Image (spheres, rainbow, N blue to C red):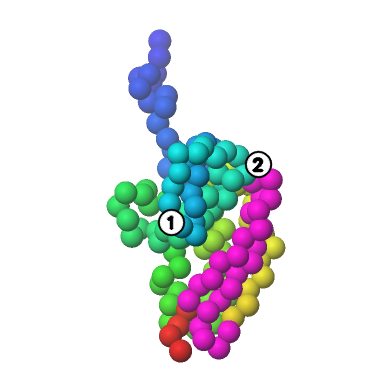
Amino acid sequence: MKLLPEEFNNVSIAGSRTRMPSKTYRMNIEEETVSGIITDDLEAVRQAVYKILNTERYKHIIYSSNYGVELANLFGKPMPYVIPEIPRRIEEALLVDDRINKVDGFNLKYDKHGNVKCYFVVHSIFGDIEIERSVKIKNV
């Protein structure tokens, strides 16, 4: 005798990590195009990182509430708050993808124009990727 109906076997649990597809169409970021060429493994993870870090969480209804990064609301906040918050938010956003094991090696540099440059390493199941991301914190 079964205690649970069979349809509940494939229910996803809230807060669980989502298995992202590894094969995807190749993006040409400079030309802002997507080609019919299929990319896989490390390059697919690199594209996923790019997309996640360039999608503001909760802004687009096409994405789930777990997808994207929350950086827009850091604009105008004081640097002592922003500097430790950026790595935490980036790590939180990227670890939703189960191909990513760890995000570390953060090095942040900010200038007098209100820009914070973030350098860090994404450790995936396919290898490591060095990432550079710029965040505008204030208008100067």
- Indicate the position of residue 96 as horizontal and vertical percent values: 51, 48
What's the amino acid at mark 1?
Answer: Glu
Q: Residues within 10 Å of mark 2 (few under 14, many from 20)?
A: some
x 54%, y 71%: residue? 134
Instruction: Looking at the picture, tell me which residue is in the foreground, 139 or 29.
Output: 29
Q: Is residue 122 magenta?
A: yes
- 1 vs 2, front mark: 1
Going from N to C along the chain, the mark reached first, 1 or 2, is: 1
Residue 118, by quadrant, is bottom right
Q: Magenta part of the protein: which range?
A: 111-136
x 55%, y 40%: residue? 39
Q: Is residue 135 magenta?
A: yes
- Indicate the position of residue 95 as horizontal and vertical percent values: 55, 50
Q: Residues within 10 Å of mark 1 (few under 14, many from 20)?
A: few
Instruction: Looking at the picture, tell me which residue is in the foreground, 114 or 71.
Output: 114
Residue 13, by quadrant, is top left
Q: Using the numbered discs, state the Cα–Cα distance from disc 1 to disc 2 in whole angstroms.
A: 27 Å
Q: Quadrant of the N terminus?
A: top left
Residue identified by numbered label 1: 32
Residue identified by numbered label 2: 125
130 on left or right of 51: right
Q: Are marks 1 and 2 in contact (CB under 8 Å)?
A: no
17 on left or right of 7: right
* Residue 93 seen in this snapshot: no
Please tell me whether the stretch drawn in magenta is mainly helix, strand or loop. strand
Disc 2, SS? loop
x 65%, y 41%: residue? 125
Instruction: Looking at the picture, tell me which residue is in the foreground, 114 or 23.
Output: 23
> Does residue 15 lie above or below 50 as drawn?
above
- Indicate the position of residue 18 as horizontal and vertical percent values: 49, 40
